[in-house]
Amino acid sequence: MPDRRDQALDQGALPTYLRIAEALTIDIGGGRLAAGDKLPPERRMAADQGVAVATLRKALQVLADRGLIERRQGSGNYVLGGKANVGTYALFRLELAGVGGGLPTARLLDLKKTKKPDSLPNIGTAFDTGIRIRRLRYLADLPVAVEEIWLDLRWHDDNGLNPRTISESLYRTYADRLGLKIREAEDVIGAGDLPDWSPDEFGIAPGTRMIRIERRAYDQYGEPCEASWTWYDPGRAQYYARVP
């Protein structure tokens, strides 16, 4: 049986340098790395990530291209912050419990068009069906959460969103494949029973009472377009938000 990484590669896993870039972008977007902060030396960052310096530098160049860091010859890499392409990443709120950070990845469990549940918040249309996405989420290769996402049909395109095209970075997939840009989101934190479709790999029995995040997201026009539930293990992950 192939391991999880092989499965992820079959289902839109990002290249290593992009995973590192996405993780750092999330840290900047969420305020963990603030404007003016100097990043650690490149060789130390590469060693911490377990990659070659060339791979790390490729990731840093992505951040520079996004306007998130400034690369100063002979001095180092400095966070700019507050630039384009950071807003969506600021919406990512889970990190490793107790230590913070953690490279976020995901494994697609299921993607289908199906009837909306009665409990689903409004996602923008009167259609009684929607696009349901179920995933297992990881931080630093540790399974920390399961999530069920519902996307409004007005944004769906079978060619743009399917098991072969969906990326670990879902909002990136929306933007690249569907032209959908998530402008903002509302999160409500409560509790809920782990659903019966939760995979064995998560290591927690379905029906277990968990912390649950209910999210409703809005498109670039300010209209609701997506809703989701995320059940996470507080022993492995924590919800992080920073208010300026």
Image: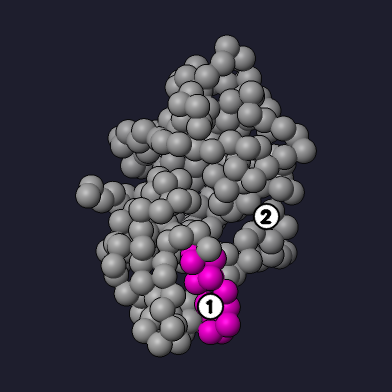
Type of the residue with mark 2: Gly
Label 2 Cα neighbours within 10 Å, binned few <14 / some 14-19 / many ≥20:
many
Residue 183 percent across, percent down from the top left? 45, 36
Q: Which residue is drawn at 63% across and 37% down?
A: 179
SS at circle 1: helix
**Horizontal arrangement in the rendering, residue 12 relative to residue 71 (left or right):** right
**Horizontal arrangement in the rendering, residue 19 relative to residue 162 (left or right):** left
Residue 81 covered by magenta stretch:
no
Against 45, residue 220 (above or below) is above
Residue in front for this viewpoint, 236 or 196: 236
Residue extending farthest to the front is 73
Main SS of residues in magenta: helix
- Gap between marks 1 and 2 measured at Cα: 23 Å
Colour scheme shown: one colour
Type of the residue with mark 1: Arg
Against 68, residue 74 (above or below) is below
Say which residue label 1 marks. Answer: 57
Residue range corresponding to the magenta coloring: 51-64
